């Protein structure tokens, strides 16, 4: 039956030029991440809220698989939303060239705690989709215009500067606070971005 759905279904990108632009932006960013070495092999993920570009026109939002996936958390602001998600174990370099073969479109179900894959292929979203969707839920809850959640696993992190007082001083501010490779990952939450 799933093969029948795939045969009947055209690309979700058909006759949606604005959605094509958004998916192409994802592909462009994936290319930059790969070229700059900021996403090793299949490391890192991208999710983009594409709800405003998806409507009831052909193809329908019938799932490609009957299997409903649980998110693991209830996200009330995502009811009925659509997201383009990089696929699990997919490489950024491949996503850059073939975004619909290396990612999928998911629809959040009415319970706000589960989703189905609706396009174009049954590519499983990133295993970190609960974290990414939680970010999107938060962004919508505060009325943020931001639509993407991106993280990477750089092969080498050369400099990580802490926001502690000693690292904010002029003579210390440009010195590496830590040097490590991707096997020694640290979590960082930058509320206002990272910059000079």
Image (spheres, rainbow, N blue to C red):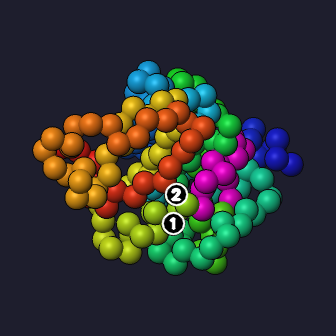
Q: Can residue 27 be spotted in the picture?
A: no
Q: Nearer the viewer, residue 187 or 72?
A: 187
Label 1 belongs to which residue?
Answer: 134
Q: Say which quarter of the image contains residue 188.
A: bottom left
Q: Give the number of callouts.
A: 2
Q: Can residue 112 be spotted in the picture?
A: yes
> Relative to residue 150, is residue 70 depicted above or below?
below
Q: Nearer the viewer, residue 151 or 164?
A: 164
Looking at the rendering, the stretch of residues picked out in magenta corresponds to: 116-130
Instruction: Evaluate if marks 2 and 1 touch, with contact meaning CB atoms under 8 Å apart.
Output: yes
| Picture residue at 68% right of the left edge, 59% below the top | 116
Secondary structure state at the residue bearing disc 1:
helix
| Picture residue at 63% right of the left edge, 42% below the top | 87
- Quadrant holding the C terminus: top left
Q: Nearer the viewer, residue 88 or 103?
A: 88
Measured Cα–Cα span from mark 2 to mark 1: 5 Å
| Picture residue at 54% right of the left edge, 24% below the top | 93
Label 2 belongs to which residue?
Answer: 132
């Amino acid at each position: 039956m799933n093969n029948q759905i795939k045969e009947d279904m055209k690309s979700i990108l058909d006759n949606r030029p604005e959605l094509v632009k958004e998916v192409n932006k994802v592909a462009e960013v994936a290319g930059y991440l790969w070229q700059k070495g900021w996403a090793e092999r299949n490391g890192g993920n991208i999710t983009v809220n594409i709800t405003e570009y998806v409507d009831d026109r052909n193809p329908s939002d019938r799932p490609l698989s009957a299997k409903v996936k649980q998110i693991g958390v209830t996200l009330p602001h995502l009811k009925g939303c659509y997201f383009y998600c990089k696929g699990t174990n997919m490489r950024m370099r491949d996503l850059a060239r073939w975004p619909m073969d290396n990612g999928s479109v998911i629809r959040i179900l009415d319970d706000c705690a589960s989703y189905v894959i609706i396009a174009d292929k049954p590519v499983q979203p990133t295993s970190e989709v609960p974290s990414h969707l939680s970010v999107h839920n938060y962004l919508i809850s505060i009325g943020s215009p931001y639509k993407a959640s991106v993280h990477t696993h750089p092969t080498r992190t050369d400099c990580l500067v802490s926001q502690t007082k000693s690292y904010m001083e002029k003579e210390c501010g440009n010195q590496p606070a830590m040097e490590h490779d991707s096997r020694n990952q640290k979590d960082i939450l930058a509320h206002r971005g990272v910059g000079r």
